[in-house]
Image (spheres, grey):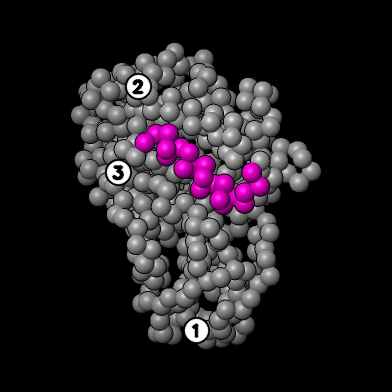
Amino acid sequence: MLNRLTVVAWVVVDPGTARVHEEGWQSWSPSGAYALDAAPYRPTNDNWATVCYRPGRTVPAGTFQGEGLLALDPGDGSPVRLWAAADPQREVPSIRLTVTGDRAEIEADGPVKERTHTDIQSVLAHWAEGLGLPAPRPAPTVWCSWYEYFTEVTEDDIHENLRAMDTLDLPVDVVQIDDGYQSALGDWLTLSGRFRSRAGIADAIRARGRRAGIWTAPFLVAPGSELAASHPDWLVRDPEGAPLHAGRNWGHDLYVLDTTHPDAAAYLAHVFTTLRAEGYDYFKVDFLYAGALDGVRHSGADALTAYREGIGIVRDAIGPDAYLLGCGAPILPSIGLFDAMRVSPDTAPHRRPEADDYSQPGQDPAEFTGAGRQWQHGRLWINDPDCLMARPAVETRERWAAHVEATGGLMASSDRLLSLDEWGVTTTRRLLSSGGAQ
């Protein structure tokens, strides 16, 4: 819910050349710079407003809004100005900008601090450097099952691609099993019928000299899961006492695990301790926005405190040496918690997103927001621009590969490797051979 707005600045602008950077709430929220006469990207339906934007922060027409960060290049040669959350890990104000004639009014619903610099990316980078975070660890190179197999991935698919990595001489450090191995969201240790042994496939990956990685969405619970049926008290509630609705995906509603409930917290720790003991040491944790939704929690903790504590449970369970990649995560509250972070919506084999909503899968929105968040790379974490797809069926694969390469971030392949033609193999090998992010 938006609090009362307070004016924090008035700035004279050149309406023809000024630009505004909006920082979106989470990984998939559109982020980037706009001309003053542009229409910023906004949710095109209520479900995406919950799953991909910041719920309860609807932006009026003709208004720019950044979640915790908003930058303005006045366009007249004067310094670029940035308004930033005063305590970004715990309180993220919405910062709005409206223009009347040649004057911009900036308002915020919480404490902000101001910085100036020469251009938009520089002022954001300067702010990030001022946080004093340690340099992030380099990212391993990755093969991920998602963009070829989606939820239908099988254990045999993993074995086939393991063999292909050797045949094609691809320098893959981590083989990451994505969504589809588990029986339901929340039932992470119960296998779907497409996998025989989670520990067995991890052993097979490591026997070939590679590391085993795995995907989870730790704060999501499917209504039809065994967890929801057996432990309804482990769910975050809405004010009426019903399970909090975190949107809809996979053809069903989404509930939220209440990690402030001691038994739910113990379960979450058990899941990740088990996966780590089975040999997985690279973890992609996804749909993290759910853990930061406002709701009624067992401890009474506010959403951002509960979110950071929930990620802390995961980190403690996997240990400091395991690599942790966040996705669908609220950006500023995640500072200091992750090795790498997805900084854009999903890519796709196609260019344009559904309904032209720039929070949805597509190469265009992934490039727009990925470029807009380049300032985060090497300062907050290693940026994950999303996976390379180099197979012939991918639309504008050359342009997408160039974007992934230019980011210098986490390098991950997500093709059925035997489907690659000569260009696809050469490009995949070159990007992976860059050694990932330094």
| Residue 237 screen position, x and y as percent | 71, 41
Q: Is residue 277 visible?
A: yes
Which residue is at a point 59% across and 43% down the rendered structure image?
A: 290
Look at mark 2 in the image and give the residue it sits on: 202
Look at mark 3 in the image and give the residue it sits on: 139
Residue at the limit of the structure toward the right, as seen here: 240
- Which type of secondary structure does the marked residue at label 2 adopt? helix
Up-down relation of residue 117 to residue 59 (above or below)? below
Look at mark 1 in the image and give the residue it sits on: 14
Question: In the visual, does 202 lie left or right of 301?
Answer: left
Q: Is residue 393 visible?
A: no
**Magenta-highlighted residues:** 299-319
**Amino acid at the residue labelled 1:** Asp
| Residue 167 screen position, x and y as percent | 22, 23
- Residue sitting nearer the eye, 252 or 242: 242
Asked if residue 7 lies in the magenta stretch, the reply is no
- Residue sitting nearer the eye, 184 or 145: 184
Asked if residue 301 lies in the magenta stretch, the reply is yes
**Amino acid at the residue labelled 2:** Ala
Which residue is at a point 26% across and 33% down the rendered structure image?
A: 172
